[in-house]
Amino acid sequence: MENVVLIIHLLLALGLIAVVLLQRSEGGGLGMGGGGGGAISGRAAATALGKITWLLAIAFICTSITLTIMAAQKSAGSSVADRIGVPQTEDSGEAPAVPALGSDLLPPAEGDNAPLVPSAD
Protein backbone atom coordinates (compact mmCIF):
# COMPACT_ATOMS: atom_id res chain seq x y z
CA MET A 1 0.00 0.00 0.00
CA GLU A 2 2.83 2.35 0.86
CA ASN A 3 4.43 1.78 -2.55
CA VAL A 4 1.18 2.63 -4.34
CA VAL A 5 0.82 5.91 -2.43
CA LEU A 6 4.49 6.68 -3.08
CA ILE A 7 4.10 6.14 -6.85
CA ILE A 8 0.99 8.35 -6.88
CA HIS A 9 2.93 10.96 -4.90
CA LEU A 10 5.78 10.95 -7.43
CA LEU A 11 3.37 11.21 -10.37
CA LEU A 12 1.63 14.14 -8.68
CA ALA A 13 4.99 15.85 -8.16
CA LEU A 14 5.92 15.44 -11.82
CA GLY A 15 2.47 16.64 -12.91
CA LEU A 16 2.68 19.65 -10.63
CA ILE A 17 6.08 20.58 -12.03
CA ALA A 18 4.80 20.27 -15.61
CA VAL A 19 1.65 22.35 -14.98
CA VAL A 20 3.59 25.11 -13.23
CA LEU A 21 6.10 25.26 -16.09
CA LEU A 22 3.27 25.47 -18.65
CA GLN A 23 1.73 28.53 -17.04
CA ARG A 24 2.35 31.98 -18.43
CA SER A 25 4.92 34.05 -16.59
CA GLU A 26 3.59 37.37 -15.34
CA GLY A 27 7.02 38.93 -15.08
CA GLY A 28 8.45 40.59 -12.01
CA GLY A 29 9.29 38.73 -8.89
CA LEU A 30 6.84 37.56 -6.25
CA GLY A 31 3.68 38.56 -8.12
CA MET A 32 4.64 42.17 -8.68
CA GLY A 33 3.81 43.72 -12.00
CA GLY A 34 2.25 41.65 -14.74
CA GLY A 35 -0.37 44.22 -15.67
CA GLY A 36 -4.07 43.56 -15.99
CA GLY A 37 -4.79 44.66 -12.46
CA GLY A 38 -4.16 41.17 -11.09
CA ALA A 39 -1.99 42.42 -8.26
CA ILE A 40 -4.25 45.36 -7.52
CA SER A 41 -7.60 43.59 -7.43
CA GLY A 42 -6.21 40.73 -5.33
CA ARG A 43 -7.98 38.12 -7.44
CA ALA A 44 -6.41 36.83 -10.63
CA ALA A 45 -8.45 35.32 -13.41
CA ALA A 46 -9.00 31.63 -12.70
CA THR A 47 -7.66 29.70 -15.65
CA ALA A 48 -7.84 26.01 -16.31
CA LEU A 49 -4.13 25.60 -15.58
CA GLY A 50 -4.55 27.49 -12.31
CA LYS A 51 -7.35 25.16 -11.22
CA ILE A 52 -5.33 22.09 -12.20
CA THR A 53 -2.37 23.46 -10.24
CA TRP A 54 -4.51 23.84 -7.11
CA LEU A 55 -5.96 20.36 -7.55
CA LEU A 56 -2.55 18.75 -7.96
CA ALA A 57 -1.12 20.73 -5.04
CA ILE A 58 -3.92 19.62 -2.71
CA ALA A 59 -3.54 16.00 -3.83
CA PHE A 60 0.25 16.25 -3.34
CA ILE A 61 -0.17 17.53 0.22
CA CYS A 62 -2.71 14.78 0.98
CA THR A 63 -0.34 12.05 -0.23
CA SER A 64 2.49 13.65 1.78
CA ILE A 65 0.38 13.50 4.94
CA THR A 66 -0.68 9.92 4.14
CA LEU A 67 2.94 8.82 3.69
CA THR A 68 3.89 10.50 6.96
CA ILE A 69 1.12 8.72 8.84
CA MET A 70 2.04 5.37 7.28
CA ALA A 71 5.71 5.82 8.22
CA ALA A 72 4.77 6.78 11.78
CA GLN A 73 2.60 3.69 12.18
CA LYS A 74 5.31 1.49 10.74
CA SER A 75 7.90 2.75 13.22
CA ALA A 76 5.61 2.89 16.28
CA GLY A 77 7.10 1.25 19.33
CA SER A 78 10.64 1.15 18.01
CA SER A 79 13.57 3.37 18.75
CA VAL A 80 16.71 4.24 16.84
CA ALA A 81 18.73 2.88 19.76
CA ASP A 82 16.96 -0.47 19.38
CA ARG A 83 18.11 -0.75 15.76
CA ILE A 84 21.80 -0.18 16.47
CA GLY A 85 22.32 -3.70 17.77
CA VAL A 86 25.50 -2.84 19.69
CA PRO A 87 25.32 -4.08 23.26
CA GLN A 88 25.96 -1.39 25.80
CA THR A 89 28.89 -2.02 28.12
CA GLU A 90 28.77 -1.14 31.76
CA ASP A 91 31.10 1.58 32.99
CA SER A 92 33.97 0.16 34.98
CA GLY A 93 34.30 3.40 36.89
CA GLU A 94 37.87 3.97 35.71
CA ALA A 95 38.81 7.01 33.68
CA PRO A 96 41.05 6.55 30.65
CA ALA A 97 44.75 7.03 31.23
CA VAL A 98 45.96 10.59 30.71
CA PRO A 99 49.54 11.12 29.52
CA ALA A 100 51.91 12.87 31.90
CA LEU A 101 51.88 16.64 31.59
CA GLY A 102 53.87 17.62 28.52
CA SER A 103 55.21 14.17 27.74
CA ASP A 104 53.49 13.37 24.45
CA LEU A 105 51.49 16.48 23.77
CA LEU A 106 54.18 19.07 22.98
CA PRO A 107 57.02 18.97 20.47
CA PRO A 108 60.57 18.99 21.87
CA ALA A 109 62.07 22.35 22.75
CA GLU A 110 64.59 23.96 20.36
CA GLY A 111 67.64 23.18 22.42
CA ASP A 112 66.40 19.76 23.48
CA ASN A 113 68.02 16.81 21.73
CA ALA A 114 65.20 14.46 22.57
CA PRO A 115 64.31 11.91 19.89
CA LEU A 116 61.21 12.62 17.80
CA VAL A 117 59.94 9.07 18.22
CA PRO A 118 59.37 7.95 21.79
CA SER A 119 61.46 4.97 22.75
CA ALA A 120 59.84 1.76 23.86
CA ASP A 121 61.18 1.32 27.40
Image (cartoon, helix red, strand yellow):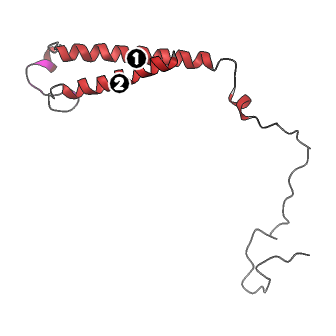
Q: Is residue 98 above or below residue 6?
A: below
Front-most of 13 and 117?
13
Quarter of the picture holding the C terminus:
bottom right
Query: Going by the image, does 42 lie left or right of 74?
Result: left
x and y, in percent, of residue 20 in the image: 24, 25
Residue visible at 17% across and 28% down in the picture: 32
Residue visible at 79% across and 69% down in the picture: 104
Q: Mark 2 highlights which residue? A: 13
Stretch of the chain drawn in magenta:
30-38
Front-most of 56 and 8?
8
Q: Mark 1 highlights which residue? A: 61
x and y, in percent, of residue 10 in the image: 39, 24
Q: Is residue 8 above or below residue 82?
A: above
Q: Amino acid at mark 2?
A: Ala
Q: Is residue 25 above or below residue 67?
A: below
The quadrant holding residue 101 is bottom right
**Residue 37, magenta (yes or no):** yes
Viewer-nearest of labels 1 and 2? Answer: 2
Residue visible at 54% across and 15% down in the picture: 69
Query: Going by the image, does 38 lie left or right of 21?
Result: left
Q: Earlier in the sequence, mark 1 or mark 2?
A: 2
Q: Amino acid at mark 1?
A: Ile
Element assignment for label 1: helix
Per the picture, the main secondary structure of the magenta-coloured stretch is: loop
The quadrant holding residue 89 is top right
Front-most of 24 and 6?
6
Residue 74 circle label: none
